[in-house]
């Protein structure tokens, strides 16, 4: 197995197939920790993890916080809306201040694509991207891939369809990078206006026909309609979306019987999928949440190990 | 792997064979008898091997005990990577593997199994890892090789072979399951 040498996790675009596999294998080992009566190991004892969130997020932040605590790290949450950012501090200054507090890892969520990359260049401590603009959300894609591998045994050669607001989705981008690197075939499906220009250059096929997207799929990853991000009101009616693209029992009848249905949450029931589908045996939505902790534990552990061992590697 | 090991024995005179296949099998069988003698049978007895080679040895001990007593006992695997005190000191980054203990360790007599007992730090980490899983009635320690040089107050209850070594020697335990052959060698470290 290859080693991990990166101090940061900024996106799956920057990782090799082997590095992605290492995260997934490490996560498989960490999953057991959450099944113990004492759900804690001392691997990051004495380390400080700062959750720096410039965008509201509950599930990703809580997942990172739980993951860090199960590794015995200390966790500090900074919601940027309530911090000095309001007083005009720049991202780089904020990062340097966190470094001066002798923190070890910054987990950043930002509405601007590329913000984690800027932060990672400005500090020596580890930076983990917890979602930046429309760019990447690497830990979400890693937990999606982990869940798929757990359910289907492999990723190589699988047909994965990603349905929904591709244009505004960092989850879709990270999934496309990761899945294609591991040999899966990706189809993205959305109304034309929600498919970004150039997405096929990342290795995904495009369709606007939901039944075609579901036909041969081993799994469908249903994205959330991000109405709060849709400033131009590109998509008028939620009901109209549900009628044309919503995942329903009827639509799944034409798909593979044991198709895996995923959703990064939070679900808009009756918009992206029917309640019947969300609660069906095909749905792995809650398993994704559980797996998210194992994957984030693996990422926190790997980046901290890479940094810890660096001086010795240079000898 | 077998070919490479053979090559070393033939070429390097600073490699000494300490235990061959038969010797190892006898040592493991003797330890199995000793464990049963001390614990007065298999009641509440469990084996936990430390990854990687300790896990294979625990499996073999379990089979020996089953042969002797006609009863099988639970055998688990412990990964101690997350409990090591030298994670930041080693440049070759260890890979985290699963801990596989699918039985309740509360109130059990646990025999920890490892291949080589050296500084005692691995065992210290294993004790922490085990106690995080519950409260055993007792923890005992079985090792194939005790090579001395302890840095912590830890001793083994069952020893396959005591080998006095110097710090610039290495003890190489090869097991069929991992290395393709059963043997223990003492090797001079490269200066």
Image (cartoon, helix red, strand yellow):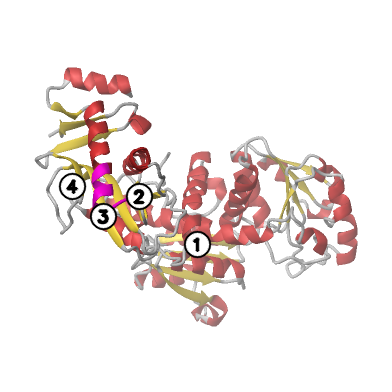
Give the left or right position of residue A121, taking residue B54 as reference: right
Q: Position of residue B90 (x, y in %)?
A: 27, 49
Q: Nearer the viewer, residue B136 or A58?
A: B136
- The reply to whether the C-beta atoms of the residues labelled 1 and 3 are less than 8 Å apart is no
- Quarter of the picture containing the N terminus of chain A is top left
The secondary element bearing badge 3 is classed as strand
Give the left or right position of residue A242, taking residue B49 as reference: right
Q: Marks 2 and 4: which is nearer the front?
A: 2
Q: Give, as a single range, the part of the protein colored magenta.
A: B33-41
Residue placed under numbered mark 3 in the picture: B140
Mark carried by residue B118: 4
Residue in the image at 12% along x and 39% along y: B163
Q: Position of residue A70 (x, y in %)?
A: 45, 65
Residues at marks 3 and 2, CA–CA distance in whole angstroms: 10 Å
- Bin the neighbour count of mark 3 within 10 Å (Cα to Cα): few under 14, some 14-19, many 20 and up: some
Q: Is residue B103 above or below residue A217?
A: below
Residue placed under numbered mark 1 in the picture: A34
């Amino acid at each position: 197995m290859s080693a991990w040498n990166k101090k940061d996790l900024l996106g799956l675009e920057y990782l090799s197939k082997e590095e992605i596999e290492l995260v997934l294998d490490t996560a498989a080992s960490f999953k057991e920790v959450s099944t113990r009566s004492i759900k804690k190991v001392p691997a990051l004892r004495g380390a400080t993890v700062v959750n720096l969130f410039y965008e509201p997020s509950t599930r990703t932040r809580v997942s990172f916080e739980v993951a860090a605590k199960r590794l015995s790290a200390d966790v500090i949450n900074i919601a940027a809306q309530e911090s000095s950012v309001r007083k005009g501090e720049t991202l780089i200054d904020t990062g340097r201040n966190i470094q001066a507090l002798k923190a070890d890892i910054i987990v950043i969520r930002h509405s601007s694509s590329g913000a984690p990359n800027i932060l990672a260049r400005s500090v020596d401590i580890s930076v983990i991207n917890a979602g930046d603009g429309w760019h990447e959300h690497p830990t979400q894609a890693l937990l999606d891939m982990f869940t798929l591998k757990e359910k289907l045994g492999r990723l190589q050669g699988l047909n994965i369809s990603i349905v929904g607001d591709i244009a505004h989705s960092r989850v879709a981008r990270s999934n496309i990078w990761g899945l294609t690197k591991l040999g899966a075939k990706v189809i993205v499906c959305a109304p034309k206006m929600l498919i970004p220009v150039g997405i096929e250059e990342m290795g995904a096929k495009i369709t606007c026909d939901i039944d075609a997207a579901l036909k041969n799929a081993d799994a469908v990853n249903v994205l959330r309609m991000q109405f709060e991000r849709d400033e131009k009101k590109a998509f008028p009616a939620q009901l109209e979306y549900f009628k044309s693209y919503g995942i329903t029992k009827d639509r799944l009848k034409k798909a593979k019987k044991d198709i895996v249905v995923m959703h990064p949450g939070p679900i808009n029931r009756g918009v992206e999928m029917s309640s019947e589908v969300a609660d069906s045996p095909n749905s792995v939505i809650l398993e994704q949440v559980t797996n998210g902790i194992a994957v984030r534990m693996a990422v926190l552990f790997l980046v901290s190990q890479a940094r810890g061992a660096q001086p010795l590697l240079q000898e | 792997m077998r070919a490479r090991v053979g090559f070393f024995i033939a070429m390097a005179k600073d490699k000494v064979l300490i235990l061959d296949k038969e010797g190892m099998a006898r040592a493991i069988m003797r330890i199995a008898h000793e464990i049963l003698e001390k614990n007065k049978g298999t009641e509440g007895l469990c084996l936990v091997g430390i990854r990687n080679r300790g896990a294979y040895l625990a499996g073999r001990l379990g089979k020996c005990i089953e042969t002797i007593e006609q009863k099988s006992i639970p055998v688990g695997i412990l990964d101690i990577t997350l409990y090591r005190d030298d994670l930041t000191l080693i440049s070759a980054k260890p890979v985290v593997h699963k801990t596989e203990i699918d039985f309740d360790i509360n109130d059990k007599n646990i025999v920890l199994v490892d291949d080589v007992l050296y500084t005692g730090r691995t065992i210290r980490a294993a004790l922490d890892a085990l106690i995080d899983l519950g409260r055993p009635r007792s923890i005992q320690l079985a090792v194939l090789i005790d090579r001395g040089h302890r840095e912590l107050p830890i001793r083994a209850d069952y020893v396959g072979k005591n080998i006095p070594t110097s710090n610039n020697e290495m003890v190489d335990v090869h097991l069929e399951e991992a290395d393709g052959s059963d043997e223990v060698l003492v090797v001079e470290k490269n200066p």
